[in-house]
Image (cartoon, rainbow, N blue to C red):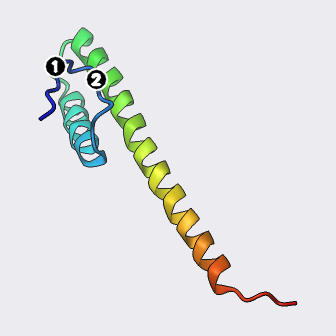
Amino acid sequence: MTEQNDPDDLSGLSYEQAREELVAVVQRLESGGAPLAESLALWERGEKLAAICQQWLDGARAKVEAARAAAESAGSPDSD
């Protein structure tokens, strides 16, 4: 089992984990109760989490587009 010792290491997060934490960060920021330094740290973490989510989505989009292109090329007969 992998332990996550460094809370700043977000590289191993799944899309769902990153999104869930991002939602929590946004809710905390929107509540307005955090001091400025904590708010800035939350903002920076949120930016990193958003980037991770975007990477997951970009990867999924690329896989779908590749599968679609492969299916189209396999299913289209040569017109010669």
The CA distance from mark 2 to mark 1 is 8 Å
Q: Is residue 70 above or below residue 51?
A: below
Could you say which is closer to the camera, residue 2 or residue 61?
2
Q: Is residue 59 left or right of residue 20?
A: right
Could you say which is closer to the camera, residue 28 or residue 32?
28
> x and y percent of residue 22 in the render?
27, 37
Q: Is residue 68 left or right of residue 54?
A: right
Which quarter of the figure is the N terminus placed in? top left
- The residue depicted at 88 percent of the width and 90 percent of the height is 80
- The residue depicted at 25 percent of the width and 9 percent of the height is 37
**What's under tag 1, amino acid-wise?**
Asn
Which element carries disc 2, helix, strand or loop?
loop
> x and y percent of residue 32 in the render?
20, 25
The quadrant in which residue 5 appears is top left
Q: Which residue lies under the disc numbered 1?
A: 5
Q: Residue furthest top?
A: 37
- The residue depicted at 35 percent of the width and 21 percent of the height is 44
Q: Which residue lies under the disc numbered 2?
A: 9
Q: Residues within 10 Å of mark 2 (few under 14, many from 20)?
A: few
Which element carries disc 1, helix, strand or loop?
loop
Q: Is residue 43 left or right of residue 6?
A: right
The quadrant in which residue 21 appears is top left
> x and y percent of residue 8 in the render?
26, 20
- The residue depicted at 20 percent of the width and 21 percent of the height is 7
Q: Are marks 2 and 1 in contact (CB under 8 Å)?
A: yes
